[in-house]
Image (cartoon, rainbow, N blue to C red):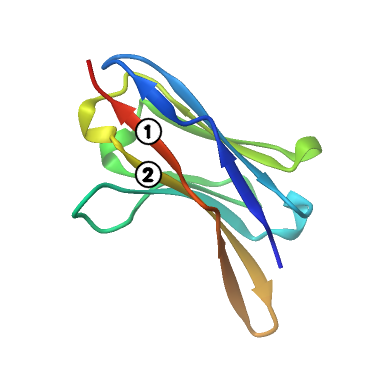
Amino acid sequence: QVQLVESGGGLVQPGGSLRLSCATSRSIFSIAAMGWYRQAPGKQRELVAAVTGGGNTNYADSVKGRFTISVDNAKNTVYLQMNSLKPDDTAVYYCKAVVVAGPGTSDYWGQGTQVTVSS
């Protein structure tokens, strides 16, 4: 089992920045991959950014150059630094952890944190 707790969401003006945090209940070293997803009203949940245990990162085209995913192993926390925010970035942001479980994997999700970009 992995518990994930997100924080850092809020209301920001276009062009502003926010940093989301996702604290895990177990060592980051024991997690195969972590990612940030978002879901806007009426839309499907989509991948924003992900990082593997080996440090490889992946970003949605819409956030490349603006968002950065990073890991603090000592704090068992994953961050999403979001710069140059746009109204289209408005969504609930979720943290996900992928853990190896036997022959397969298990996914764990946080409760989500709202990000609203508006003037």
Is label 2 in a helix, a strand or a loop? strand
Residue 115: which disc? 1
Task: Please give left or right for residue 86 compared with residue 5 in the image.
Answer: left
Q: Name the residue under label 2.
A: 92
Which labelled disc corresponds to residue 23? none
C-alpha span from label 2 to label 1: 6 Å
Q: 64 above or below 22?
A: above
Q: Is mark 1 on a helix, strand or loop?
A: strand
Quick one: label 2 or label 1, which is nearer the N terminus?
Answer: 2
Q: What residue type is labelled 2?
A: Val
Q: x and y percent of residue 42 in the render?
A: 18, 54
Q: Which of 7 and 15 is in front in this view?
A: 7
Q: Residue 89's spot in the image, x, y percent?
A: 28, 34
Q: How many marks?
A: 2
- Residue pictured at 35% horizontal, 14% vertical: 16
Give the residue at x 47% y 48%: 112
Residue 91 in the image, given as x and y percentages of width and height: 31, 41
Query: Looking at this rendering, what residue extends furthest in the left direction?
Result: 42
Asked whether, in this view, residue 23 is left or right of residue 9, the answer is: right
Marks 2 and 1 close (CB-CB < 8 Å):
yes
Q: In which quarter of the image is residue 101?
A: bottom right
User: Badge 2: how crowded within 10 Å, few (<14), some, or many (20+)?
Assistant: some
Crowd class of label 1 (few under 14; some 14 to 19; many from 20; radius 10 Å) = many
- Amino acid type assigned to the residue bearing label 1 in the image: Val
Residue 20 placed where, x, y %?
52, 32
In terms of image quadrants, where is residue 71? top right
